[in-house]
Image (cartoon, coloured by chain):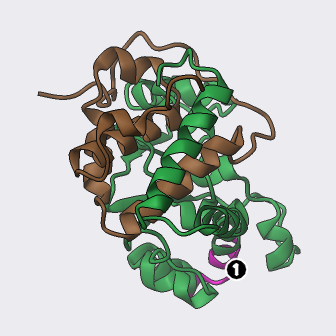
Amino acid sequence: MSGDHSSSVISAEVRHVEALLEARGLLDAGEIDTRIDEFLAGGTPANGARIVARAWVDPGFAARLLADANAAIREVGLSMAGGLQEQRLKVVANTEQQHNVVVCTLCSCYPIALLGPSPSWYKSEAYRSRVVRDPRGVLAEFGLELPAGTSIAVWDASAESRYMVLPRRPEGTGSLSEEELAALVTRKGLIGTAAV
Amino acid sequence: MSRINDVGGMAGFPAIIEEPDEPPFHSDWEAHVFALNGALIKRGVYNLDEFRDAQERLPVERYLAASYYERWFAAITTLLAEKGVADAAELELPHGH
């Protein structure tokens, strides 16, 4: 499985293993397609954005979210228990004094239930190696220039613990509805490589 | 001793590249590998920690040369062989394909 393998070779290899497993009763016909469909219909950054918008308009929810995110997100119909195992979720709030950014230095741990599949850059050795050594420089490459007085906390996710950033509510958004606020929140904002 | 996956703070990797409008999977086989892993873990053929371990102990040069889902598939076939589900030769494509 070197990187030199063409896509058609690895496609054939994967089909071969699937057929073998079906023949041995370890995989049902159609099970793969069902799983793919369910996954693609599941988490998207809109879930994380919905949590953020609720926290912006409801200080009580924000406090519960920061204290016990697994419990709080159930209030908006979301859960971290839908995957292979329940994962602990910690939501970290950006302030004027501290910006937060999430990484998984060891592999690619990510709150898929809330954000959907992670972007390739999140899984790259480049991001994983550098954001812990030079977070300010990496964030600048993403176009996020933070004031020198703002400290940066880097949260390293693991198999058991996942993180999501609660961005600061942009100024001048006082008249927006919760739904309109959610539309402002991006995937990068939820990871911490963008302000919102 | 740390393994090759433990890259935090390591120098020498290339620049971070963002892919605009990146799809969840870049080809069908990646989606199949993703789903296959979930199915095997659900059946208890192996668990999530074993899956991570199988990726992390890939030979360094293979780990670094492989794409993300190529690593996943390498870990899956490694575990299927080690768990006795199939021997390594059966997991490979028959000759002539």
Label 1 resides on the chain identified as: A
Establish if B78 lies above or below B94: below
Residue A95 seen: no
Range of magenta residues: A53-60
The residue under the point 33% across, 26% down is B7
Residue B10 seen: yes
State which chain is coloured brown.
B
Circle 1 residue: A57
Looking at the rendered structure, the kind of residue marked 1 is Val
Establish if B41 lies above or below B4: below
**Front-lying residue, A65 or B2:** B2
Q: How many marks?
A: 1
* Image coords of residue A64 (percent x, y): 47, 83
* Image coords of residue A156 (percent x, y): 36, 46
- Taking the magenta stretch, the answer to whether it contains residue B64 is no
Q: Tell me: A154 left or right of A190.
A: left
State which chain is coloured green.
A
Per the image, label 1 sits on a secondary structure element best described as: helix
- Taking the magenta stretch, the answer to whether it contains residue A54 is yes
Q: Furthest-front residue in view?
A: B96
Establish if B11 lies above or below B5: above
**Front-lying residue, A69 or B78:** B78
